């Protein structure tokens, strides 16, 4: 098996050089890397979950810092941290469930705090009683007043009182013995929990990888519920999720047309239009500037997303905010398709959240055209023409009508609650080292 640190460094280099792009690819590779990392971790017997969480956090910070724009990387890191916490809680609860004792602490040193233990006075009394022969005086001195047997004139004399005290001492020792057995059993169960934790986490990460791999299919299965006969659908750019969604509706004998805005300057809409036409869909390519002119003929806008933020806002390919505004102006539903791995539990106004990146100016202008605009006469060579080529748009939640995820459709207002089911609040502080 290759060294896990080499795998981490190799993936970091790929992220920095943008050799891995796309939310699904980044999410899947991140989950696979963390699975390998966890499987090779040697953890201490004490507080194994805490050590594993810190190790994953350390690696996660490196991955996030390598390419902060790929928010899916951070999403998967936080999902894995949530899995570790949930599995540890589940195993601990199962371990103490048979004893009907509550678990609150994560450290073996605190085992005595997790269960209803004897008071300090009672333990001291039992210890002293074990070191010297019991007598009526020592019993009356050591046993707390709240549980001492009171003297009553009707007790039948000295022998009767001694009998009662010996009975009480016997029952007291039995209680102490049961408590000691319970503590030993909990310690054994704790060791069993540490042995099972890594195995269960890896199994849960395998399920996460499977979820990411099949997200397109899960979303496409819902297409027939949202696309109806003779509708006109508009989309922009190219998205694998949108492609599978539209083609799934076509396979269910839905007849509809698709307007594809080309998505300049990369013109990914051309590839999408060709794919849809090849698979039997009536497709029309339009320029991005024609969106407002054509939107009145459309019944629904269906688009993909780069990431979905905690407030329900969407990080999407550049140009989609314009499409969303046009859809709102004409009261047309604006539907966003996004796998669960694209749900980001951060808010867009946070300074550590990088929402955009600038692509190469060569996508807009050839180098020869750009060099002609340099001011060589001034001697500094500073350009008179600047080229800005952002990769993403931000679509606020009020422009989104519906999110369709692997597990169904949701309103924008529900996204925050949905994210609470997949992320732990303690893990939201994980960020790239360069941003901290």
Image: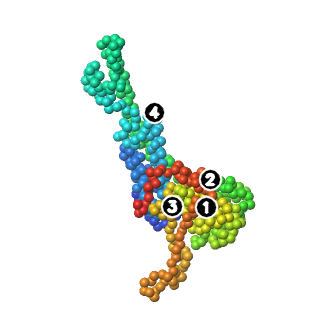
Which of the two discs, 3 and 2, labels the residue nearer the N terminus? 3
The residue that disc 1 covers is 399
Residue 179 is situated, as x and y percent measured from the top left of the image, at 38, 30
The extreme top residue here reads 156
Which of the two discs, 3 and 4, labels the residue nearer the N terminus? 4
The extreme front residue here reads 153
The image quadrant that residue 186 belongs to is top left
Name the mark nearer the viewer: 1 or 2: 1
Classed neighbour count for the residue bearing mark 4: other residues with Cα under 10 Å, few (<14), some (14–19), many (≥20): few
In the rendered structure, are the residues bearing label 4 and label 2 in contact, judged by CB atoms less than 8 Å apart? no
Residue at disc 2, secondary structure: strand
Residue at disc 3, secondary structure: loop
The residue that disc 4 covers is 100
The residue that disc 3 covers is 348
Residue at disc 1, secondary structure: helix
Mark 1 vs mark 4, CA separation in Å: 51 Å
Residue 217 at least partly seen: no
The image quadrant that residue 379 belongs to is bottom left
**Observer-nearest of 365 and 349:** 349
**Mark sitting on residue 409:** 2
**Observer-nearest of 274 and 370:** 370
Mark 4 vs mark 2, CA separation in Å: 40 Å
């Amino acid at each position: 098996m290759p060294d896990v640190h080499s795998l981490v460094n190799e993936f970091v280099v790929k992220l920095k050089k943008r050799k891995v792009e796309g939310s699904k690819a980044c999410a899947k590779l991140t989950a696979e890397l963390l699975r390998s990392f966890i499987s090779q971790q040697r953890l201490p017997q004490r507080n194994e979950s805490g050590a594993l969480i810190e190790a994953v956090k350390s690696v996660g910070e490196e991955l996030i810092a390598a390419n902060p724009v790929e928010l899916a990387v951070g999403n998967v890191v936080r999902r894995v941290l949530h899995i570790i916490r949930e599995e540890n809680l589940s195993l601990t609860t199962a371990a103490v469930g048979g004893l009907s004792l509550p678990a609150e602490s994560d450290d073996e040193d605190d085992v005595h705090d997790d269960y209803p233990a004897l008071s300090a006075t009672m333990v001291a009394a039992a210890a002293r009683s074990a070191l010297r022969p019991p007598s009526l005086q020592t019993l009356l001195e050591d046993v707390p007043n709240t549980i001492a047997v009171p003297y009553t004139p009707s007790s039948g004399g000295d022998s009767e009182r001694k009998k009662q005290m010996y009975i009480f001492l016997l029952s007291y020792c039995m209680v102490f013995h049961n408590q000691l057995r319970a503590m030993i059993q909990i310690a054994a169960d704790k060791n069993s929990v540490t042995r099972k934790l890594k195995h269960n986490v890896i199994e849960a990460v395998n399920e996460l990888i499977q979820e990411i791999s099949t997200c397109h299919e899960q979303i496409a299965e819902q297409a027939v519920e949202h696309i109806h006969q003779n509708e006109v659908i508009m989309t922009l750019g190219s998205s694998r999720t949108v492609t599978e969604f539209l083609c799934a509706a076509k396979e269910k004998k839905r007849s509809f047309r698709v307007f594809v805005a080309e998505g300049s300057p990369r013109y990914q809409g051309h590839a999408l239009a060709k794919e849809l036409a090849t698979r039997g869909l009536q497709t029309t390519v339009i320029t991005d500037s024609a969106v407002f002119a054509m939107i009145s003929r459309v019944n629904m806008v269906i688009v993909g997303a780069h990431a979905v933020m905690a407030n329900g806002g969407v990080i999407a390919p550049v140009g989609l905010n314009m499409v969303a505004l046009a859809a709102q102006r004409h009261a047309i539903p604006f539907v966003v398709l996004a796998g669960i791995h694209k749900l980001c539990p951060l808010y867009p106004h946070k300074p550590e959240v990088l929402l955009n990146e600038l692509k190469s100016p060569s996508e807009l202008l050839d180098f020869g055209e750009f060099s002609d605009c340099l001011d060589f006469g001034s001697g500094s060579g500073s350009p008179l023409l600047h080229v800005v080529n952002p990769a993403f748009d931000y679509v606020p939640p009020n422009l989104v009508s519906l999110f369709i995820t692997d597990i169904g459709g949701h309103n924008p207002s529900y996204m925050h609650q949905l994210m609470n089911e997949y992320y732990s609040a303690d893990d939201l502080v994980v960020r790239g080292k360069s941003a901290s």
